[in-house]
Amino acid sequence: MIFLRTSEKTGACFIRTDQLDGETDWKLKVAVGCTQRLPAVGDLFSISAHVYAQKPQLDIHSFEGNFTRDDCEPQIHESLSIENTLWASTVVASGTVIGVVIYTGKETRSVLNTSFAQNKVGLLDLELNRLTKALFLAQVVLSVVMVALQGFVGPWFRNLFRFVVLFSYIIPISLRVNLDMGKSAYGWMITKDENIPGTVVRTSTIPEELGRLVYLLTDKTGTLTQNEMIFKRLHLGTVSYGTDTMDEIQSHIIQSYAQGPSQPSGGAAAGGATPSRKPQTSGPKIRKSVSSRIHEAVKAIALCHNVTPVYESHPGVNGETESAEADQDFSDDNRTYQASSPDEVALVRWTESVGLTLVNRDLTSLQLKTPSGQILSFHILQIFPFTSESKRMGIIVREESTGEISFYMKGADVAMATIVQYNDWLEEECGNMAREGLRTLVVAKKGLSEEQYQDFENRYNQAKLSIHDRSLKVAAVVESLEREMELLCLTGVEDQLQADVRPTLELLRNAGIKIWMLTGDKLETATCIAKSSHLVSRNQEIHVFRPVSNRGEAHLELNAFRRKHDCTLVVSGDSLEVCLRYYEHEFVELACQCPAVVCCRCSPTQKAQIVRLLQRHTANRTCAIGDGGNDVSMIQAADCGIGIEGKEGKQASLAADFSITQFRHIGRLLMVHGRNSYKRSAALGQFVMHRGMIISTMQAVFSSIFYFASVPLYQGFLMVGYATIYTMFPVFSLVLDQDVKPEMALLYPELYKDLTKGRSLSFKTFLIWVLISVYQ
């Protein structure tokens, strides 16, 4: 849908896309300018306009189109991009919107990225089918041998069919019934296990697959993480503050604004209450220096973001929050924050906890409240949003009380290292925080004079009007400001993991299961979670597959990766697509040698494509686990799909073969129930064949003794009872059999490795059972 108009005065709204791409970050969408400016909603139905949209495609991160209003002279033309669209399966999180629908039904992005469910057949069933074919061949051969030893006398073909019927017990006709009964029992045991409450078995035909897995492909958002960001660390170069020392920062902020006009010159006066400035003579010098730096850092974090506060309790029509409102309106307990990233919200919530609160924001202004209740007003001059290419965002603001213009910027350390002034601690501290699994952001500042800003604004506006190479020219102008910026601080934010994710991943790794993390999130976020969850070992090297766009670049990067050993691979969806187009076999061969693989910026279709890739190039079984609608294709494509009932609904849970409530339950599901199900079914299948081979061997001996006569050894209810009542108890004992206790299976996950080699059911074990049958 093309976004035409919103009830929000800013002309923009936030949407949630977690059911489409797995990202819980709220996305900012902007209405078409000429329709948003119409005086009333009803005017939309009286204008004459048309929309050009590109044909339906899989890519959910791009869109090209044009909006043209025909009833104006001259015509109004506006280009449309991804920020003007609202895809199906997304949720509007703020205000109400009106738009024109351009894609419906099978043409929507969500449907194009969803694959249809397929019937799944377990590997054990396929192996038993092969053994059954071998038994049928043995039955025919044995019948021919009996007729040949008889000398093909008389109507030998009639005797041949008689022997085929007599030896029919070789074929395990009751195998399917016994196996289905056993699988139903396994499913009931899984459901009733008190250690994994809430587990549901939706496909009762493949519980043995849980015991044969080699590759586990997992989503990140909502599967490994809780999507709850917590501010953990603030580093100023000479001093570092953790969660246990945040009260010191709060006292510094209170002291800075309590001084009023005598606060450090780098910071703004408390709302400009007193225009004059007093000399800074009180207090120790080092104390003032630290206090000034803390104040500047907190202020920068409170200003440089895209967060908007929302007051749910305010009435909608004329209850807009104004800068002149009373302070109590800003201290509403129902204040919530909307942002395009949970990191942003975590940072703003932290500044609120230490005393500097974001109370109001629109497209042109921003207001902060100090610990003393004073309001600081800032005019937003320019915003440079975060992009995956630049890895940073910036904002230029003018403080209304002093007229000071400041340029604040924050971003990844790799992007900010060349922008900030020389220092000797940033790289080392970024590495330390990254090893702790924290997501780092470097914050910097640069003061601008009025002349400097006017010169920049003129060049910036000219670049934005360019027809050719607009983005390059705009980037060049912005980069002219990004020089010799003052490094203020380094922040560390932790993405809370699900309970017991680390021991569960370690358990799976010790069991010989290779874990691939497929996420639609950014590369930096995915890498941080891989480290914090211990998907990547502490001393393990990470190889980031650099972006490639053609065959030559892919070839060079694959050669560079081939020289690495025992390292985790991190690759983006775009680079993955290029590699699979030209070097599919080589890429899969190298990736399968890695202990872990992280694929970021993956679309739902790419997730399913990776699953099929592993199935096609390896003979191993795959399992996919996720919790969102964007994981459905991956879950359905895998040999075994596991869905987690989470905050994102039950779409993945309903489409999966097994449904669990927490990621940590997968350890017991595989190590205990998967292992037992496979070993029990393998023994049960071979026992049923063994049972038929015994009676057929006796029949062959009986016929041989009586001159190869095609006469049955047992008749009537004896044979009926043999396959049911007489051999019933061994079947029950095998279904309930347990070679090791569950605690031992979890304590020694290495026992699981033996199952992946298929040693419990093979032609070797089958021949052993045949020899036992003949002997008995």
Image (spheres, rainbow, N blue to C red):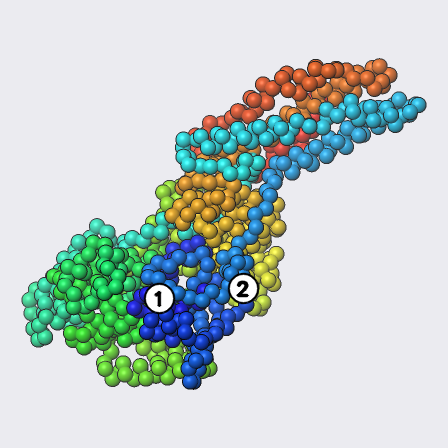
Left or right, residue 308 beside residue 286: right
Front: mark 2 or 1: 1
Mark found first going from the N terminus, 2 or 1: 1
- The image position of residue 138, as x and y in percent, is 77, 30
Residue found 47% across the figure and 37% down from its top: 200
Label 1: state its secondary structure: strand
Residue found 12% across the figure and 71% down from its top: 272
Find residue 345 and report its image quarter.
bottom left
Q: Which residue is mark 2?
A: 57
Say if 470 sits above or below 335 in the image: below
Label 2: state its secondary structure: loop
Q: Which residue is mark 1?
A: 6
Left or right, residue 662 beside residue 299: right
Q: Quadrant of the N terminus?
A: bottom left
From the viewer's side, name the closer residue of 132 and 119: 119
Residue found 18% across the figure and 60% down from its top: 330
Q: Is residue 432 visible to us here?
A: no
- The image position of residue 143, as x and y in percent, is 82, 26
- The image position of residue 538, as x and y in percent, is 40, 50
Residue found 10% across the figure and 67% down from its top: 260
